[in-house]
Amino acid sequence: MSVITEKKANDLIFDKISAMGHEQVVFCHDEKTGLRAIIAIHNTVLGPALGGTRMWQYASDADAILDALRLSEGMTYKAAVAGLNLGGGKAVILGDPRKDKSEPFFRRYGKFVNSLNGKYITAEDVGTSKLDMEYIAMETKHVSGLPEHKGGSGDPSPVTAYGVFMGLKASAKRVYGHDNLQGKKVMVQGAGNVGRYLIDNLMKEGAQVFVSDIFEDQIQRVVSAHSSVKVIAPQDVYGIDMDIYAPCALGATLNDDTIPQLKAAIVAGGANNQLQDPNRHMQMLMDRGILYAPDFVINAGGLINVYSELEGYNRQNALAKTEYIYDQTLAIFEAAEQEGISTMEASIRLAQRRIDAVANIKTRL
Ligand code: NAD
């Protein structure tokens, strides 16, 4: 009986991998360090699969696998739309980032990354730090986003925020006919790395900025730099009078509960996976006439920054490439209208077309 159950479980994993189109999924295990990790390589048509390593205490192994599969698929689309020669990959380490880390743990993980010979390039993500990347780099060169003193590109957040700002301007252009954000009411949810730099850009432009965070010290950092920013309690974010809602905290903030409350004309922010259910909640936004700038399109600045590191890092080049998010976002809005589809669907189609076209060239002599 248990053999049958196990077989069913395995079949489900392969069904999922085959439906999502992954090339390779690697399970890493090391008894001595307690390392358990999954490296998911979704697509390498455009280039090596680059994506961060997340460390998280998952409720189950199945949750960890699904997270790795979904995140790596998202990286494929993000890189393709951003015009980078990168594929999509992502890794998850199963464990508590506050308790289970050590030098041997990450060096052992680095050896696993190295065994893929550059097919997967790792980087920082939720639960992993610059120091962890330094340990990984002791065992493999296939790691990016190292600190500046190690020859890396350092903190990607200012570049991510700049790309998000470009996405906001493109959205404004679409809705208001001009991209000047002066006087526009922008609700920035999350005063972390991305949110803070986004607010700096918005203030320079003369926008009317609202901010919310669950931690007082994060709010204080913003308010001490920009005294005119208005603070909104986390539970009041969705209902305030605003033009643009910019989610820069966690994912899934666009859901059954929040969308009906939104007074914004535009949703454009840096957080990953903003739509709790990508199909249903995208449709709900469309039904309410709210323009949605897909998250993976406008938050690609961090990836562009890391990609520049592979070519020999230069921040000005990274910012210049990130500016292209403005044109790409407008092109996606246009394609969505022409094809009668959502902006999310238009972005995925754009990514898939580029991947298919390049795959076609690669198969020819
Ligand atoms: P961060 O942890 O520095 O900031 C997130 C902030 O959100 C924190 O200050 C946190 O207190 C706050 N927050 C959490 N829950 C909240 C809530 N309910 N209401 C209001 N605030 C809340 O993270 P970050 O690096 O700024 O990233 C923000 C988002 O952007 C994440 O979803 C991340 O995956 C995504 N992202 C970041 C980058 C990057 O370069 N940092 C790149 C691409 C995508």
Image (cartoon, rainbow, N blue to C red):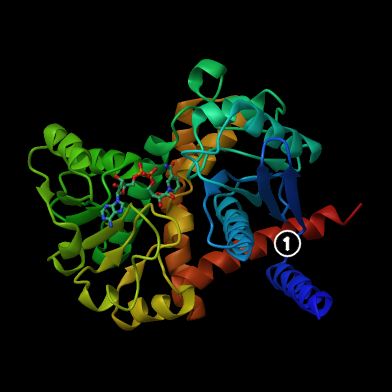
Q: Is residue 107 left or right of residue 168?
A: right
Which quadrant of the figure has residue 24?
Answer: bottom right
Q: Quadrant of residue 241?
A: bottom left
Q: Is mark 1 within 8 Å of ligand 1?
A: no
Q: Could you tell me how many numbered marks the image carries?
A: 1
Furthest-right residue in view? 365
Q: Position of residue 359 (x, y in %)?
A: 78, 58
Name above or below for residue 300 compared with residue 313: below
Q: Is residue 30 left or right of residue 94?
A: right
Horizontal placement of 32 versus 269: left or right?
right
Q: Residue 102 in the image: x percent, y percent?
A: 58, 30
Q: Which residue is more in the foreground, 145 or 10?
A: 10
| Residue name at image x 26 percent, y 44 percent | 191
Q: Is residue 183 visible?
A: yes
Give the class, few, some or many, for how many residues have Cα within 10 Å of label 1's Cα (few <14, many ≥20).
many
Question: Which residue is at the front of the view, 181 or 47?
Answer: 47
Task: Identify residue for label 1.
Answer: 22
SS of the residue under disc 1: loop
Residue 301's spot in the image, x, y percent?
A: 46, 43
**What is the residue that sits farthest to the front in this orientation?**
1
The image shows residue 11, relative to residue 237, as above or below, that is below
Q: Nearer the viewer, residue 339 or 348?
A: 348
Image point (60%, 32%), residue name:
144
Residue 316 position within the rendered picture, expressed as x and y whole percent measured from the top left: 45, 28
Going 15% across and 37% down the picture, which residue do you hit?
220
Task: Say whether residue 86 is visible.
Answer: no
In the rendered structure, which amino acid carries the disc numbered 1?
Answer: His
The residue sitting at the left extreme is 228
Q: Residue furthest bottom?
A: 287
Q: Quadrant of the N terminus?
A: bottom right
